[in-house]
Image (cartoon, grey):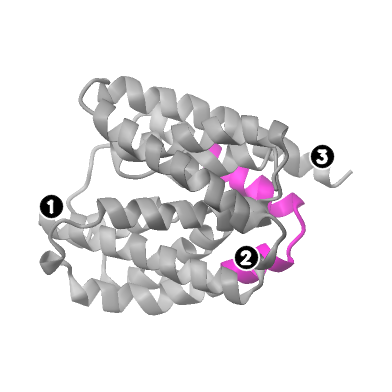
Amino acid sequence: MMPVETLAFVVPVIFVAYAVFGMTGFGAAMVAVPVLVQFMPLQFAVPLVVLFDLACTALVGGSNWRRVSLDELKRLFPWLLLGIGLGVTLLHNAGARWPLMLLGGFVLAVCIRGLRGSPAKTNIPLHAYWALPFGVFGGIFSALFGTGGPIYTIYLSRRLDALDQFRATISVVILSSGVLRAAAFGAAGLYGQADILSAAAVLLPVSLAGLYAGSRLRTLVSPGLLKRAILVLLAIAGAGALYRGWISAS
């Protein structure tokens, strides 16, 4: 079983990450993974968080899946599946240094962009062939770090004009991605690691409590303040992941 001193740090991380999910509908892995890798290997943290993502995404779900764009799912899924396969291979076989540094760099880039403010949204749609790079890189980042949601969101938001259709489609993509990742992690033997399933059993109620708390707090916290606080916390965690990757080579 995970040591008590490790649990003392991990429990609040999982709670806060899924409270963020409850308030925003996304971002749990972006919050949790960069912090968790300070206490456990990346190859342990990512499969663990995927199990919580599955439970919480299934609970929140898409309220109107009849509006899902099947055409976009057909375009994305072959490339998403390829990306997940590549990401699981890298996660299973790569050393700690470069995946951690890539995670830290990616998180810091997202934070800098968010804190500077996003440019005005363009209405120019993406061509369908962009499903290939967005699907592959979304799958790789999903498998490596559990953070593919923003990549899928960029693609689908530029392909689907109707908000209800976009929300329903991104819900299915993220949930299906979680199922595929969990299956791939199982096939790669990552769920055979000592303590991972017992840790998941202990921490799953924590993630659900965070989800409930976040959904209750959603109307009480200013969206702008919440966004900036999350970005600052992410920047600190991203810098920590970079540091961990750097010292792992020594």
Q: Which residue is mark 3?
A: 247
Q: Which residue is mark 1?
A: 163
Query: Badge 3: few (under 14), some or many (20 or more) residues near its Cα, within 10 Å?
Result: few
> Residue 102: within the magenta?
yes
The Cα atoms of the two marked residues, 2 and 3, are separated by 27 Å
Can residue 118 be seen?
no
> Residue 183: within the magenta?
no
Q: Disc 2 vs disc 3: Cβ atoms closer than 8 Å? A: no
Magenta span: chief secondary structure: helix
Q: Where is residue 99? Give x, y as percent.
A: 67, 53
Residue 102: mark: none
Q: Which residue is mark 2?
A: 191
Considering every residue shown, the one lying at the far right of the view is: 250
User: Where's the C terminus, which quadrant?
Assistant: top right
The type of residue carrying mark 2 is Tyr
Mark 2 or mark 3, earlier in chain: 2
Q: Where is residue 137? Give x, y as percent.
A: 48, 63
Which region is colored magenta?
86-108
Quarter of the view holding residue 208: top left
Mark 3 or mark 1, earlier in chain: 1
Residue nearest the observer in this picture, 110 or 171: 171
Residue 143 horizontal side relative to residue 102, left or right? left
120 versus 232 height, above or below: below
Secondary structure, mark 2, is: helix
